[in-house]
Image (cartoon, rainbow, N blue to C red):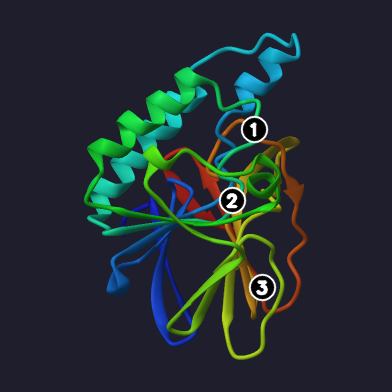
């Protein structure tokens, strides 16, 4: 078994939870990620808070690797692709346009989140297909805010779920997938985010991300 993949059966379909912080639906040729918050570093820097660069390059490298390994023809962005309008510097916009050209054969679909709406129109050079709220396909609704919908299983982001683990006096806090009976929440794709601790209730599953591995806890 690949330690970086875990299969889940939801809505009559088999999907993969990936250690790369992504959801893979092989039968649909689709990968979904959430909460990239592009421009967050730039936003902080503009407010006089010095932060190390490299977050964006790490995200783009992981996205490229993900698209290559899954051979997905569609990438769903489950909201909060960008952090703020002021973070969309000319350098950032140009870098992302260049990255987009290297994956011109992949359809990028954005389900707008609260940060995206505040940021306003996004650069046309990014070649995005944008939906104001959600996309329904097969048994699923893909969206940003996690809320149950009758007749559909919802995949969402927004909460940046985190799992707390402890053993022998040691404690860890790791990003995770939180998969409930009606709603599944993806971890934030960007490592430069906070998170909400999850509490597992009956009927729910939690999959923590530990480096290249994904483990059910």
Q: Position of residue 134 (x, y in %)?
A: 57, 69
Of the pair 174 and 92, the residue shown nearer to us: 92
Q: Which mark is residue 85?
A: 1
- Above or below residue 169? Residue 160 is below
Of the pair 139 and 112, the residue shown nearer to us: 112
The quarter of the picture where the C terminus appears is bottom right
**How packed is label 2: few (under 14 Cα within 10 Å), some, or many (20 or more)?**
many
Q: Are marks 1 and 2 in contact (CB under 8 Å)?
A: no
Q: State how far apart marks 1 and 2 are (Cα).
A: 23 Å
53 horizontally vs 165: left or right: left
The quarter of the picture where the N terminus appears is bottom left
Q: Position of residue 4 (x, y in %)?
A: 38, 50
Of the pair 135 and 171, the residue shown nearer to us: 135
- Above or below residue 81? Residue 53 is above
Residue at point 64% right, 32% down? 85
**Residue placed under numbered mark 2 in the picture:** 187
The answer to which of marks 1 and 2 sits earlier in the sequence is 1
Residue at the bottom extreme, as displayed: 151
The answer to which of marks 3 and 1 sits earlier in the sequence is 1
184 horizontally vs 10: left or right: right
**Residue placed under numbered mark 3 in the picture:** 204
Q: Are marks 3 and 2 in contact (CB under 8 Å)?
A: no
Quadrant position of residue 133: bottom right
Of the pair 199 and 35, the residue shown nearer to us: 35
- Above or below residue 141? Residue 68 is above
Element under disc 1: loop
Q: Position of residue 22 (x, y in %)?
A: 45, 53
């Amino acid at each position: 078994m690949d330690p970086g993949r875990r299969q889940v059966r939801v809505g009559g379909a088999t999907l993969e939870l990936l250690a790369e912080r992504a959801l893979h639906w092989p039968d649909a040729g689709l990968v979904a990620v959430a909460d990239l918050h592009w421009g967050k570093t730039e936003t902080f820097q503009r407010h006089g808070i010095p932060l190390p660069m490299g977050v964006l390059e790490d995200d783009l490298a992981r996205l490229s690797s993900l698209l290559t390994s899954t051979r997905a023809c569609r990438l769903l962005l489950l909201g909060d692709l960008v952090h703020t309008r002021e973070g969309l510097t000319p350098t950032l916009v140009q870098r992302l346009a260049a990255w987009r050209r290297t994956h011109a054969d992949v359809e990028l679909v954005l389900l707008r989140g609260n940060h995206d709406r505040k940021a306003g129109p996004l650069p046309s050079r990014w070649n995005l297909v944008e939906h104001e709220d959600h996309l329904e396909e097969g048994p699923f609704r893909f969206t940003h805010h996690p809320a149950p919908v009758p007749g559909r299983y919802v995949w969402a982001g927004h909460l940046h779920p985190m799992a707390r683990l402890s053993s022998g006096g040691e404690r860890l806090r790791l990003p995770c997938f939180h998969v409930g009976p009606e709603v599944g929440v993806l971890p934030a794709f960007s490592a430069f985010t906070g998170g909400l601790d999850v509490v597992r209730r009956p009927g729910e599953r939690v999959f923590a991300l530990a480096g290249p591995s994904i483990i059910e806890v």
